[in-house]
Image (cartoon, grey):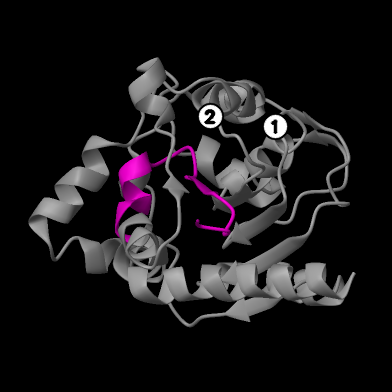
Amino acid sequence: MNSRPNLVLVTGPMVGASSWSPTADRLRALGWRVHVPDILAATATLPPWRELSTHYARLLSLEEAPILVGHSLATVVIADLAGRIPACGLIMLDGEIPPESGAVPPGSDSFRKFVTGLADCDGYLPPWSDWYDNRRRSLVGIEEIARDADAFAALRRDQPRVMRRWFDDRIDLVSWTHIASGFVQTSVFFDHAADEAERRGWPTLRIKGTHLHPTLQPDETAAAIETICAQFARNDNRE
């Protein structure tokens, strides 16, 4: 019998579930029970920010409490989801660490200002992979993935088109900090979040990569998730 907990991999809302597929495949090969709920396939359009965790909860039917792994903006989503389904751990991967509770927007003030400035005259944002200049495309990992035409086509195909006002929403978080949590940093954008995770005493890994590490470097990403899970298990055994 597999005594490991289920892993639920939650993608950032600006890309599709396929961004997790390479890492999910590696984890399954290592013996993990992995779930990658595809909210866009289920809903056809991206739900409002405040409703994301409700939709994810509807897509999950697990007998045991899973470890929730959230990438990018989904670090906030998994904290909210943990208030709707039982969870035995949270792993936040290259995103902001949300506050303990209260109204939380999608991203920092500077990020939302940047994003809303990209809207066209009808209020629509371009696809996420078109948001960045050449330097940031490299740091995000878009330049690397664009070298593989099929992989880049899959990434673009899964990106929802949203309006500028989507970023005006708030998730009303309830307290989640009693749940064991860990952090994996893969890009230079989240040094501050890794610092905060270490300050809190969370198991924290810093990887020199890009924001799209789960897609581009699945072996390293899977190993990092396994390492955090192992630390959760060691901590449980000490209690």
Residue 227 in the figure: left or right of residue 81: left
Q: Name the residue beneath numbered marker 1.
A: 85
Residue 176, horizontal then vertical, whole percent: 83, 45
- Rendering quarter of residue 182: bottom right
Residue 29 in the figure: left or right of residue 172: left
Residue 29, horizontal then vertical, whole percent: 32, 64
Looking at the image, is 67 positioned above or below residue 80? below
- Of the 4 image quadrants, the one containing the C terminus is bottom right
Crowd around label 1: few <14 · some 14–19 · many ≥20 (10 Å): some
In space, the residues marked 2 and 1 are separated at their CA atoms by 9 Å
Q: Secondary structure at mark 1?
A: loop
Query: What amino acid is at disc 2?
Result: Leu
Q: Which residues, given as a range, are shown in magenta?
A: 1-22
Q: Nearer the viewer, residue 186 or 237?
A: 237
Residue 66, horizontal then vertical, whole percent: 62, 46
Q: Which mark is residue 60?
A: 2
Q: Which mark is residue 149?
A: none
Crowd around label 2: few <14 · some 14–19 · many ≥20 (10 Å): few
Query: What amino acid is at disc 1?
Result: Ile
Q: Nearer the viewer, residue 38 or 87?
A: 87
